[in-house]
Amino acid sequence: MLLLLTLYFLSWFGLLALSVGLFARQRGSRPGALPRLMPRVSILIAARNEEAAIGRCLRAIRALHYPPERIEVLLGDDASTDNTAAVADAAMEGYGGSFRIIAITDVLGTARGKANVLAHLARVASADYFFITDADIAVPPTWLQGLLAHAQPGVGIVTGLTLVTGPRLFHRLQGLDWLMSLGLVQVVTDLGRPVTAMGNNMLITRAAYEATGGYEQLPFSVTEDYELFKAVLRCSYTSRNLFRAEILAESLPMYTWGGLLHQRRRWMRGVEQLPAWLKLCLALYGSFYLMLAGLAVVAGVGPALGVWGGKLLLQGAWALLCFRRVGRRVPLELLPMFELYTILLSVGLIGFRLLPVSFSWKGRQYR
């Protein structure tokens, strides 16, 4: 038993150390030159009961360093029962570009939820580049140029980067968790194995989107961005995944544990469709605490504490690399509390996955 535990921890530390080394050396996609006359772009935003967040999102859109007359902003109001549309109208009053609110009243093909909203917006959009973000996201002023610089011939999707932000400890732990996780995604992508796209910070060309048939012809999924990503690759387009400061958007946090569990359960639907080798790596990474408890039983508390200390040091180096690459302060002081956060989240998700219960998203139930 001790030999198996030793092999496990050697594999665990080796995997993370390899990721640290690769991330430190590889710089990802390099930006290309932008045209003198910037292309027209369509920004697509799906919103459902977002009166508390949509104003922040649209103020960030208005602050983009891009000619507003070259921007078309389309907001899909998905049967909101609050003041989403009124707040959006007020936030965009006097905007120099084009802004429209599209009321979503019917379903297109197989699309449901957010995918259905985006299917409607894509049909209305007039530009050759679709920029997709969410109502709880504030994009940076350099967002459009930052993604466009990587939309080279043959590239169908360019995925940006988000950081969860908020004043409370719970919010900041989510930010630490999310950015380090996206760093692992970047490592795999830089090895030539793109695995996903992120629908809150994404560019997709009209040509690539239409080649898939659009969301109305794709199988329904609560991780609609991943479904679109797979379809784009099947159509012989390539993708780019960016870990760069100029496209770093800020996301509002989940405010409760329940909300966080529902969000992560939805994301797990996408994880369950990943290649077997990657799921094996994730299982190795995520079973650390279970194996640590086994080590404490077999070898004693002292060796287990030593292994745990090594994890904190290596994870601190990983966090340092991820945050410094995007020019943000590294919250190393959160790492001890992050251990408890990760344990609670892992236990909650395992229970959520095993129990035959539905999860909710934007007021709708899914299984």
Image: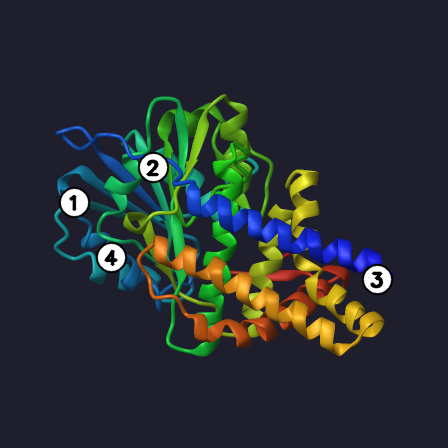
Residue 291, percent from left and from top? 76, 64
Check contact, mark 4 vs mark 1: CB within 8 A.
no
Pick whichever of labels 3 and 4 is earlier in the sequence.
3
Tell which tag, 3 or 1, sits nearer the viewer.
3
Residue 203, percent from left and from top? 36, 38
Question: Circle 4 sits in a helix, a strand or a loop, which is it?
Answer: helix
Pick whichever of labels 1 and 2 is earlier in the sequence.
1
The residue lying toward the viewer, choosing from 131 and 296, is: 296
Q: Which residue is mark 1?
A: 97
Q: Amino acid at mark 3?
A: Leu
Question: Circle 3 sits in a helix, a strand or a loop, which is it?
Answer: helix
Q: Which residue is mark 2?
A: 130
Counting other residues with Cα less than 10 Å from the Cα at mark 3, is it few (<14), some (14-19), or many (20 or more)?
few
Q: Which residue is mark 4?
A: 60
Tell which tag, 3 or 4, sits nearer the viewer.
3
Q: Is residue 154 above or below residue 330?
A: above
Disc 3 to disc 4, C-alpha distance: 54 Å
Check contact, mark 3 vs mark 1: CB within 8 A.
no
Residue at the (48%, 51%) spot, across then down = 182
Q: Amino acid at mark 4?
A: Ala
Q: Amino acid at mark 1?
A: Gly
Q: Which residue is mark 3?
A: 2
Disc 1 to disc 2, C-alpha distance: 15 Å
